[in-house]
Image: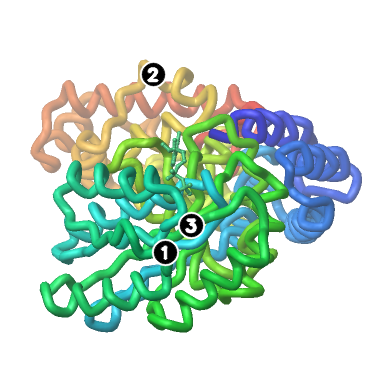
Amino acid sequence: MFENLQSKLDKAFKTLKGHGKISEINVAETVKEIRRALIDADVSYKIAKDFTAEVKDKALGQNVLTSISPGQLMTKIVHDELVHLFGSTTSELNLKGSPTIILIAGLQGSGKTTFSGKLAKYLLSKGRSPLLVAGDVYRPAAINQLQVLGEQIDIPVFAELDNKSPVDIARKAVLFAKNTSRNVVIIDTAGRLSIDEAMMREIRQVKDAVNPHEILFVVDSMTGQDAVNTAKAFNDVLNFDGVVLTKLDGDTRGGAALSIKSVVDKPIKFVSNGERMDAISIFHPDRMANRILGMGDIVSLVEKAQENYNEAEAERLQRKINKNEFNFDDFLKQLQQIKKMGNLKDLMGMIPGVGKAVKDIDISDDSFKTIEAIIQSMTPKEREKPELLNGSRRKRIAIGSGTSVAEVNKLVKQFDDMRKMMKSFNKVKSMGFGKLPSGK
Ligand SMILES: Nc1nc2c(ncn2[C@@H]2O[C@H](COP(=O)(O)OP(=O)(O)O)[C@@H](O)[C@H]2O)c(=O)[nH]1
Ligand SMILES: [Mg+2]
């Protein structure tokens, strides 16, 4: 999904070079590339332009922390902006009313009938008892299609083969639902190949007749900008409640998904990614942004680094490392810092290059406990000056910390290795990870 957009954004982030702050100069090329990537994904020029203006604003003047690269920071900024574009929060279905009436609208072929089945199955799994309604009365095949789906997922279908009035069918179906204790009525409707006045009038009449609690507009995400125009036309007539994006399993470029919320100001509620009845998911803006960027791990890394960054402390450490004065106290503090950020192995894995650099140094989350115990058994002087740790002191520390001399020796050795490693990175600030290679 969105592979093309993903690789273009990725490329854009890689053009961002430089250190310290993101500036007007080093961000210009990246922003241009991001805009191009969006337009190539069939996002309208205006949305792409507004999007990149916002990204640029947010990026300018931001400090690039040493534990992340400018490209990683940019990834995070673009991620946040994508989430914003998608409407930020997950929108639930309105399931009030007894029965809850859900009207499904959209063009022919957009996936309405398939989605109606999926939604029914989904709601059944949530403990609801849905009724499907065959409101596409013009083609017998359409009614049959819904009946076949209904049978497959074990959900009743209300259909009247000889009745050509969708309004009448919808009304009767609601009554039928009440009489048979079905608490959700899902009305599938007829679509046309393009926006058509008669179709709009008809679906509007169905709406007025049954007063749905939820009107979902179904749109084929492969149709790009067209999808956005269709959405607008439907919204003008129906004032629908939410959007369903179908066929996300195809090689859709992403334009529809990215634009629709900002054009109609209605949330995307569901996405469909396949023909099977279980190919339905609730739309989560943040997860979608992660998928588009294909870099969710970097986003959380940047978040964690930003949460835990303390500039003054970083500078203090920097000076100590330069003077080779980094000691066990600092080490302990850094460990505690790292622990706050979560699972160490995961963190290491997120950082390009570092995982490899420390692969022979055994610092697992569990060994934190031992390390902490050992350091805490050292006197302040010993922590400050690891050189003091002779044989008898090590023995005392081993006893005090409930470990062995071998373990103390191992830690001292690791600490030494780490000091060397840190010095070998050209600049070290926070978290003892050192300056990272740029790129992601
Ligand atoms: N790949 C894929 N195909 C879908 C999806 N949703 C629907 N389809 C297919 O698209 C075609 C039209 O779907 P249908 O539900 O009949 O659309 P309707 O005319 O709006 O009712 C059918 O062949 C479906 O199997 C989806 O999410 N992914
Ligand atoms: Mg249909």
Q: Residues within 10 Å of mark 1 (few under 14, many from 20)?
A: few
Residue receiving disc 3: 190
Q: Is residue 425 left or right of residue 270?
A: right
Q: Residue furthest front?
A: 162
User: Residue 338: x, y in percent?
Assistant: 39, 45
Q: Which residue is mark 2?
A: 359
398 up-or-down from 20: above or below? above
The answer to whether residue 333 is visible is no
What distance separates the C-alpha of mark 1 from that of mark 3?
Answer: 11 Å
Q: Nearer the viewer, residue 305 or 32?
A: 32
Between tags 1 and 3, which lies in front? 1
Please tell me which residue is depicted at 23% across the width and 52% down the height of the picture. Answer: 121
Label 2, secondary structure: give it: loop
Q: Earlier in the sequence, mark 2 or mark 3?
A: 3
Q: Is mark 2 within 8 Å of ligand 1?
A: no
Q: Which amino acid type is shown beneath numbered disc 2?
A: Lys
Task: State how far apart marks 2 and 3 are (Cα).
Answer: 60 Å
Where residue 405 appears, x then y in whole percent? 15, 25
Secondary structure beneath dot 1 equals loop
Side of 285 relative to 172 (left or right): right
Q: Residue at x 35, y 54 (%)?
A: 116
Residue in the picture at 34% in, 41% down: 279
Work out whether mark 1 precedes mark 3 in sequence or the reverse, and give the earlier one. 1
- Cβ of mark 3 under 8 A from ligand 2: yes
* Residue 394, placed above or below residue 268: above
- In percent of width and height, residue 385 lies at 41, 38
**Foreground pick, 246 / 101:** 101
Q: Amino acid at mark 1?
A: Lys
Circle 1 residue: 164
